[in-house]
Image (cartoon, rainbow, N blue to C red):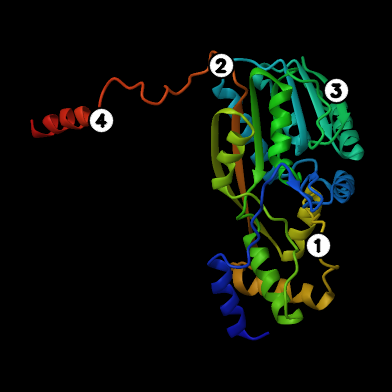
């Protein structure tokens, strides 16, 4: 592989070219004027991938545990309790294991599209039960939430919602399932996740196949998260982001970790299976561009944390436009006089 070509694509991709960005829409109209959901991911394939992940998953995953711990830390900032809680999709077993009494949860509903993942959680709960928490299990889809309206105090989703075709719609359903003043907590993978793998795969495909095909999922950008919360109707929205860098012995170990997390490619319009030559070229480019002195390769996981509340009269609200009684000019004059003194 030519070094000049690698450097060219490295400059272009690091500048942002060729990186997929996710589009959001609750509904679109087809040629006949009928409204239909946007289809980006193959949800049936994703369910099968999560079935496989239930068998491959390690008892404790440092990355998954760190994300779940960070998400649950937000409960310690809340003075109120959340007796009835839904934990849906993603890393739900890590959330259950790391709760440790936070949030004052009395009834916990564990939901996943994968029957095998639900069985895994059941078995784990039998071995290490959460004291004073009544736990029930449901096989269900975040896109068609099987929960009664205004029945929950808290909804938690840890690393699951980024695989939904209609993310705003799924968040709206979560809001409707909450009681007034109920809390929504979510963690999703952001657009800078696996940027090293995206670059290496693109360079290898351009060199070996003369073009590129979608190999990694389009993900949300940080700037989109606040708009998503507002669009879903949540009050007091909060967004923050963390980046985790995980080091692997080689790119193959990274791929195996993604499979164990259930994070394999599930795009509807995904390309055919990567051929052997391109796969080897991807690994070679990855190591040549990103490997450290000790031979390990890094992988970036950008996690976006979102917090929102269902509307309630007790929540603070912004004053109506034009209701101010003090002019900014008067404030500026006052501060100006203070500076002169």
Between the C-alphas of marks 3 and 4, the distance is 55 Å
Residue 47 rendering spot, x and y as whole percentages: 87, 45
Please name the residue that numbered disc 1 is placed on. Answer: 270
Residue closest to the eye, 206 or 52:
206
Mark 3, residue position: 136
- 144 lies above or below 164: above
Q: Earlier in the sequence, mark 3 or mark 4?
A: 3
Mark 2–mark 3 Cα distance, whole angstroms, equals 25 Å
Helix or strand or loop: what does disc 3 sit on?
Answer: strand
Extreme residue toward the left, this view = 341
Q: CA distance from mark 2 to mark 1?
A: 46 Å
Which residue of the protein is positioned furthest toward the front in this rendering? 32
**Which quadrant of the view contains residue 115?**
top right
Circle nearer the N terminus (4, 1): 1
> How far apart are the alpha carbons under marks 4 and 1?
55 Å
Residue name at image x 70 percent, y 78 percent: 206
Q: Secondary structure at mark 1?
A: loop
N-term-proximal mark, 2 vs 3: 2
| Spatial CA span between label 1 and label 3 | 36 Å
Image x and y of residue 291, in percent:
62, 68
Callout in the foreground (2, 1): 1
The residue that appears at 79% across and 55% down in the rendered structure is 264
Image location (x, y in percent) of residue 139: 88, 32
Which label belongs to residue 328? 4
Eyeballing the image, is 326 above or below 225? above
From the image, state whether disc 4 or disc 1 is nearer to you.
4
Disc 1 crowd, CA 10 A, few/some/many (<14, 14-19, 20+):
some
State the mark number for residue 79.
2
């Amino acid at each position: 592989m030519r070094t000049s070509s690698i450097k060219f694509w490295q400059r272009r991709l690091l500048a942002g070219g060729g990186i997929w960005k996710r589009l959001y829409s609750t509904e679109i109209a087809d040629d006949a004027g009928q409204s239909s959901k946007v289809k980006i991911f193959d949800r049936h394939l994703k369910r099968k991938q999560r079935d496989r992940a239930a068998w491959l998953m390690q008892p404790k995953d440092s990355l998954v545990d760190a994300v779940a711990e960070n998400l649950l830390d937000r409960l310690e900032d809340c003075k109120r309790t959340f007796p009835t809680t839904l934990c849906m999709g993603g890393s739900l077993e890590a959330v259950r294991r790391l709760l440790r009494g936070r949030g004052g949860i009395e009834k916990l509903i564990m939901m996943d599209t994968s029957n095998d993942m639900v069985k895994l959680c059941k078995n784990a709960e039998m071995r290490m039960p959460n004291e004073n928490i009544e736990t029930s299990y449901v096989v269900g889809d975040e896109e068609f939430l099987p929960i009664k309206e205004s029945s929950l105090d808290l909804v938690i989703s840890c690393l699951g919602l980024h695989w939904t075709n209609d993310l705003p719609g799924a968040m709206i359903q979560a809001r409707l399932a909450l009681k007034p003043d109920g809390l929504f907590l979510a963690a999703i993978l952001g657009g800078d996740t696996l940027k090293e793998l995206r670059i290496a795969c693109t360079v290898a495909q351009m060199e070996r196949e003369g073009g590129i095909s979608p190999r990694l999922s389009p993900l949300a950008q940080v700037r989109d998260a606040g708009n998503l919360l507002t669009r879903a109707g949540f009050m007091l929205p909060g967004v923050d982001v963390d980046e985790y860098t995980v080091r692997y012995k080689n790119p193959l170990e990274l791929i195996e970790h993604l499979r164990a997390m259930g994070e394999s490619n599930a795009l509807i319009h995904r390309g055919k299976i990567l051929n052997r030559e391109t796969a080897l070229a991807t690994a070679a480019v990855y190591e040549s561009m990103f490997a450290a002195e000790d031979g390990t390769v890094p992988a970036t996981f950008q996690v976006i944390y979102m917090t929102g509340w269902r509307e309630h009269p007790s929540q603070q609200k912004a004053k109506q436009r034009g209701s101010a009684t003090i002019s900014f000019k008067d404030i500026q004059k006052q501060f100006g006089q203070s500076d002169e003194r």
